[in-house]
Image (cartoon, rainbow, N blue to C red):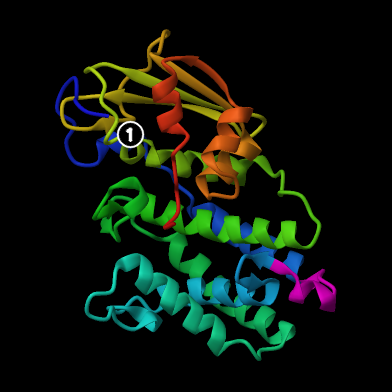
Amino acid sequence: MSPESHSVSGTSWLGDPIDARPLFSSELAALLDTLRDLRPSDWRKTALPRWTVHDLAAHILGDYCGPLSRTPGGYRGAITPGETLKAFIHRTNQEWVDLHADDTPASLVDALEVAGTQLADRFATADLEAPSLGVSWAGADPAPGWLDTAREFTEYWTHRQQIRHATGRATDPEPHALATVLDTFMRALPHTLRHTAAPVGTQIEVIAEGPAGGKWTATATTNRCSLAEPPSDRPTASVTLDTETAWRLCTRGIDPTTALARARLQGERRLAEAVCQIVSIIH
């Protein structure tokens, strides 16, 4: 949304910082437990449209190795002339998966344990205030360290849920991790609403209901939409989703039309519909 009630400098418009650093070790442990509990046939099940559980586990290993080798491009190589960032990411992700196609499940789990432990140690001392890699879906480049770190956590958590779903398990209900994921995903709201015209002071409230839920308020300010403004008791529009619908919408596990059908909407419908276009991954 544009515009703004007063100037919001730096990245304060992203809202209060998130500290996901303590969660990486427990997330790794949960992933390893999940993978070690799989039957041989589970590794061949479809986790994503083009990837099996084995492929996705290999991809997670690549995601672990990337930050550990954060040289220009890391293991990913370089963008070719004319290649978009999205195309580059999809290409190099597939190249990594193909490279590990013949790895046994046991060797993948062992490699994930080693790299994941190193990564958790790295993130434990990450500087939350230092400028970091851009988070395109939040419109922040460079992003503050806390957002880049939280974004990394959401990716690992999301991929673990995809493996759980592929093998007949429900989303992990542990509330602290899911609450952190949702809080991170909602930092995409200002970027989502950047082209939605609204007067200064317009507020859109998003509520996720459930033990891991929360509430976020996006406010139209002079230059951009902000999550840093005090919420009003009477927002211009309100969107209420259950937590399962919310995180699946942000990762395009469900589409906006499905989310709207499940949501409770109040106020201006066009603003609520704009909220449901949120995407918190590179899509």
Q: Is residue 191 left or right of residue 223?
A: right
| Image quarter of residue 214 | top right
Quadrant occupied by the C terminus: bottom left
Query: In the current view of this chain or complex, which residue is farthest to the front?
Result: 257
| Image quarter of residue 67 | bottom left
Horizontal and vertical percent position of residue 135: 34, 54
Horizontal and vertical percent position of residue 154: 52, 53
Count the numbered circles shown: 1
Question: Which residue, given by chain and number where applicable, does mark 1 sit on?
Answer: 193
Horizontal and vertical percent position of residue 41: 83, 76
Q: Nearer the viewer, residue 164 or 15?
A: 164
Q: Is residue 236 left or right of residue 49?
A: left
Residue range (magenta): 36-46
Horizontal and vertical percent position of residue 102: 65, 91
Q: Name the amino acid type tagged 1.
A: Leu
Residue 234 vertical position relative to residue 119 in the rendered view, above or below: above
Q: Is residue 58 left or right of residue 11?
A: right
Quadrant occupied by the N terminus: top left
Q: Is the residue marked by circle 1 packed among few (<14), some (14-19), or many (20+) residues within 10 Å?
A: many
SS at circle 1: loop
Q: Nearer the viewer, residue 148 or 1?
A: 1
Q: Residue at x 41, y 61 (%)?
A: 125
| Image quarter of residue 57 | bottom right
Residue 245 covered by magenta stretch: no
Residue 251 vertical position relative to residue 162 in the rendered view, above or below: above
Residue 195 vertical position relative to residue 95 in the rendered view, above or below: above
Residue 37 covered by magenta stretch: yes
Q: Nearer the viewer, residue 201 or 211?
A: 201
Q: Residue at x 79, y 55 (%)?
A: 169
